[in-house]
Amino acid sequence: MSEKLRLDVYLVEKGLAQSRTHAQELIEAGQVFLSEGSQRRILKKASQSVTIESAIIVEAGPANRFVSRGGLKLEGALEHVKVSAKNLNVLDVGISTGGFTDCLLQAGAQFVLGVDVGHGQVHSSLLKNPKLKVCEGVNARNLSKEDTVLQYVPKDKFDLIVMDVSFISISLILPELPYFLKSNGSILSLVKPQFEVGVEGLGKGGIVKDESLYAEVEKKIREVCAQSSLEVLDYFPSPIEGKDGNREFFIYCRHLNRI
């Protein structure tokens, strides 16, 4: 009898997905098919069983254009604020797997410096790119004092800073970022309210339980920007929703005292 596997497990074991989470994203995006002779049938459930010999096809699409969904979020945000990454020097705060960085490099960024508090998370396909330098074990709250980071900062600093962090309020990191910006540089950061409202603002499953808190989060982040000499140009919903059900937003800002 042929061995049977869950579809998401099969995709990982066959190298068609990076992880079970990624496999589920591919399935939800409608990109996974079973080839049966001359016919193809779309597979819609991660839990369904397939044999190890099954002819599974994964089509190119939104769920595998970048190494993580973060790439889709940033792509949509860049389009919204009408910013091209082509030929830019960019700092990616909270690089993680590298979704934002993948989006930037595919869009033609000249150089990306990725920093993260963790280790060994960046997708291997990105590490081969000579336009990327990664600094791990970095506490972004003290970014301007991190010698391991400072040595890779371009002489005229960064055109753009992008940020996607978890389990910390971006209000603790934003004051560090102007130091790394060119006078006409800008910041495009994901805002995750579930990490801004405090435990008391969260309901079951870590979901923000009161939608009125979203406005309070925006007010707080805008105030931090003002205190950090950053002019807020836009604050808008993320084009791609967070996977856990929480709403996410982007803030777009630049130096107040730009040349």
Image: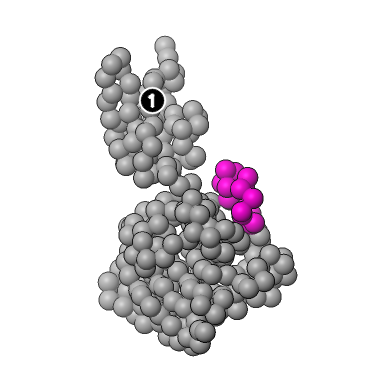
Q: Return the x and y of residue 149 as percentages of the image width and height.
A: 68, 66
Q: Residues within 10 Å of mark 1 (few under 14, many from 20)?
A: many
- The answer to whether 96 is drawn above or below residue 230 in the figure is above
Q: Amino acid at mark 1?
A: Ile
Q: Which quarter of the picture shows residue 231?
A: bottom left
In the shown orientation, is residue 151 left or right of residue 2?
Answer: right
- The answer to whether 125 is drawn above or below residue 178 in the figure is above
Residue at 42%, 59% (x, y): give it. 74
132 in magenta:
yes
Q: Which residue is mark 1?
A: 56
In the shown orientation, is residue 12 left or right of residue 118?
Answer: left
Residue at 44%, 76% (x, y): give it. 253
In the shown orientation, is residue 186 left or right of residue 158?
Answer: left
* Residue 195 makes an appearance in the image: no
Element at badge 1? strand
Q: Return the x and y of residue 249 as percentages of the image width and height.
A: 36, 67
Q: Could you say which is closer to the camera, residue 121 or residue 82?
A: 82
Quadrant (top left/top right/bottom left/bottom right) for the N terminus: top left
Q: Return the x and y of residue 45 as percentages of the image width and height.
A: 31, 35
**Magenta part of the chain:** 118-134
Q: Could you say which is closer to the camera, residue 141 or residue 108?
A: 108
Residue at 69%, 75% (x, y): give it. 145
Residue ranking furthest to the top: 1
Residue at 38%, 44% (x, y): give it. 63
Q: Which quarter of the picture shows residue 180?
A: bottom right
